[in-house]
Amino acid sequence: MLKYKLAFISLLIVLIASCASIGGTKSPGETRLTSMISPSIENIPLSEDEAEKKLAAIFQSWESLDETVTIEPNKKGFTVNGQQFLDPDGKILKYAVNHSTGYVTYLLDTGLGEYVIKSSRVPLVEEPITIATGRISGKGILSIQTNNEKQLQGLDVILLSKGFLIVGRNSVYRYLPGKGFSNFGTPGEGFHIASYQNGDVSSTNYILLEKTKTWSDNSNDPLDNIQSLWDITIDLAATFGLTTKEDYMLVNLKTGKVHPFDISIFGKDDHTYSNCQRQNDHVRKCHNMHSFESLYTLNGLHPNYSHYFWRIKWFNTPSGVIAIAQENESHDITLANLITGQKVVAFNSFTGFNAGFNTVQDTSGKITLTVAQKAYLPASIPFLGPQMLNAEVSKEKIDDVAEYIALHSKMKNME
């Protein structure tokens, strides 16, 4: 068995080396995506439309935070200082937040075939305000209408802490309350804007892009099948630590500079199986599998930590834009200052970090990072059957992430 494993690994090395010799490499600092450069929010003038003027006045009336607020995602949307945030108009599907100001925008499913986009400042100073409504056609086209009855269509909506993006096939538009719609940068070929952003695009001027798969699983084209096999090979090689999978990158919207991350697109999906037949007490053979993107496990009890949403966060701080990521097949927790280019591996685990990481940003902009390791023990839960009961076995903490990056980058340069 060992010789087969060694042979397989040797084959992966040969394949990867072949690809590298054909494609070549570029260091991250050399890469710029000029098509993503977009006008700064400060340079976009206020709208003369009366509905937009009213929105601008409401946002300007919101007071700044005077104490730290903790905002965390969960299955029902998000919590504020440990308390579930609820909206009586529907279910929160996703949200965007500026942790240092408390500004939050969220997308609601009303259950009536209509979607509502609302903005607020948390903890609540007044009732959230509706900034847009939307509907999805049978063909998956999203129509968004703002308060001044301006309407645009797209395939996805990306939320900002103040406003949102409408992503089309070849265009992206940004909506800012009080300023209206304006053109936004487009990734071009090879990448697209990731649907879930675990950082505030508005305050950081960074947006997360995801690699676009250009082949079809169901294609009969031999070239597509070769591409499929190659992608699977690279995923397996990344599992063995033989290569990197830079399927995600943060792009600076002012300069176009790219910061790739060793995070694989493989793992963001969950799967359901059907048409299954029992083979024995431990094995079932299933003929159909349905894959879908999911932030949570099928039973909804735990986050799907393989999803990129849980693996990269970024924040605006006085020291620069700070990114925290789980890279190298979740074996490394990395910290980076995207402005200075400093990057360090804060934690490394041979078995990987199976419970993600937690962050808190206070009103001064300081970020505290906590990384926990969990042991999974067999358990049985009524109505759900056998499950994995997680118990925390260790915890690491960094009190000031920006300070840690600066200190350990200097130490590394002195070695």
Image: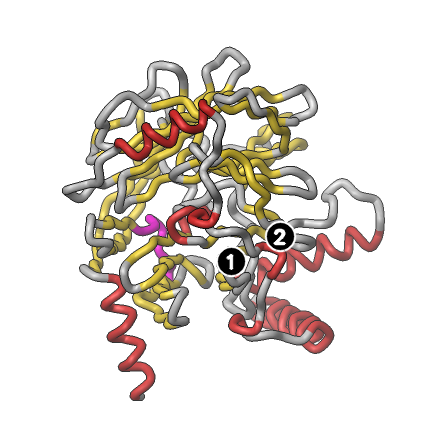
- When asked about the image quadrant of residue 288, the answer is top right
Q: Position of residue 321 (x, y in %)?
A: 36, 59
Q: Nearer the viewer, residue 61 or 173?
A: 61
> Mark 1 belongs to which amino acid?
Val
Evaluate whether residue 276 shows in this view. no
Work out which quarter of the rendered image holds the C terminus and state it: bottom left
- Above or below 305: residue 291: above
Q: Which mark is residue 187?
A: 2
Q: Is residue 248 left or right of residue 100?
A: right
- The x and y percentages for residue 236 are 58, 60
Q: Tell me which secondary structure the magenta stretch mostly adopts.
A: loop
Q: Secondary structure at mark 2?
A: loop
- Residue, far bottom: 415
**Are the two marked residues, 2 and 1, in contact with CB atoms closer than 8 angstroms?**
yes
Q: Residues within 10 Å of mark 1 (few under 14, many from 20)?
A: many
Q: 2 or 232, which lies in front?
A: 232
| Picture coordinates of residue 387, whole percent (x, y) | 36, 34
Q: Is residue 124 left or right of residue 272?
A: left
Identify the coloring. secondary structure
Span shown in magenta: 350-357
Please say if 291 is above or below 31.
above
**Which image quadrant is residue 85 in?**
top left
